[in-house]
Image (cartoon, helix red, strand yellow):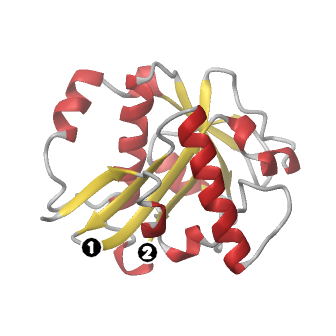
């Protein structure tokens, strides 16, 4: 069947890679662990899918989940309030997770996930995708700033460590070309710079 990128449905939430399934870093203002985190993640997806629509992409190869991206309006991510630079623009959606399992990193899969999110948002008439970047990334759920930069994001609100970065969807995507590219299976992604 090969590699595919799917929209996360309620049935697919259990297929999210465990590191992300057991994290509610962005979905809750406080930390929770283990089964509680998974419960809150499923609850967040249920509410967001019902009220806003598609909010996640899952990269799979056969039955194996290899990557995950999650996005939604910034009001659905209470942890953003902890970061002074995280004032997301009114015309943007926030990219909270873009995760690739360790053995598939540096193969371009993170880039494919960002592109799939961008295509979805262009079709839904959003102007931009924004995310916090971590200039000193050594792990965790704030995306590496070099990865975001390599994928076309530029700084819109600077911070010494956690700048808010923006991908302008109207300037970077031609929706017709991107929809045509989406119809092509992802058999062998091109390597892309970045950490995801």
Please tell me whether residue 115 is drawn above or below residue 101 in the rendered image.
Answer: above
Q: Which mark is residue 11?
A: none
Front residue of 111/93: it is 93
Please state the horizontal and vertical placement of residue 85, each as a whole percent of the image: 81, 41
Is there a contact, CB below 8 Å, between mark 2 and mark 1? no
Residue at figure coordinates x 75%, y 52% from the top left: 162
Q: Quadrant of the N terminus?
A: bottom left
Q: Is residue 188 left or right of residue 32?
A: left
What residue is disc 2 on?
A: 101
Describe the element under mark 2 as helix, strand or loop: loop
- The residue under the point 66% across, 66% down is 39
Horizontal and vertical percent for residue 149?
52, 47
Q: Position of residue 110 (x, y in %)?
A: 41, 58
Residue tagged by mark 1? Answer: 63
Picture layout, residue 143 above or below residue 88:
below
Q: Is residue 3 above or below residue 74?
A: below
Neighbours of disc 2 within 10 Å: few (<14), some (14-19), many (20+): some
Give the label, 2 or 1, closer to the camera. Answer: 1
Q: Secondary structure at mark 1?
A: loop
- Residue toward you, 79 or 47: 47
Q: Residues within 10 Å of mark 1 (few under 14, many from 20)?
A: few
Left or right of 126 on screen, residue 141:
right
N-terminal label among 2 and 1: 1
Q: Is residue 128 visible?
A: yes
Locate residue 18, reporting x and y percent. Answer: 53, 76
């Amino acid at each position: 069947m090969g590699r595919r990128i799917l929209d996360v449905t309620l049935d697919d939430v259990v297929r999210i890679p465990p590191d992300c399934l057991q994290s509610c870093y962005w979905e809750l203002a406080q930390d929770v662990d283990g089964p509680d985190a998974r419960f809150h993640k499923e609850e967040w997806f249920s509410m967001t899918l019902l009220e806003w629509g598609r909010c996640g992409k899952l990269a799979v190869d056969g039955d194996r989940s290899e990557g995950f991206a999650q996005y939604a309006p910034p009001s659905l991510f209470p942890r953003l309030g902890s970061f002074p630079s995280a004032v997301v623009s009114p015309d943007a959606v926030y990219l909270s997770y873009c995760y690739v399992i360790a053995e598939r990193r540096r193969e371009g899969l993170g880039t494919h996930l960002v592109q799939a999110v961008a295509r979805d948002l262009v079709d839904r008439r959003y102007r931009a995708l924004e995310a916090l970047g971590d200039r000193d990334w050594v792990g965790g759920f704030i995306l590496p700033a070099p990865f975001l930069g390599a994928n076309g994001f530029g700084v819109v609100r600077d911070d010494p460590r956690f700048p808010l970065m923006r991908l302008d969807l109207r300037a970077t995507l031609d929706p017709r070309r991107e929809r045509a590219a989406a119809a092509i299976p992802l058999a062998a992604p091109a390597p892309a710079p970045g950490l995801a």
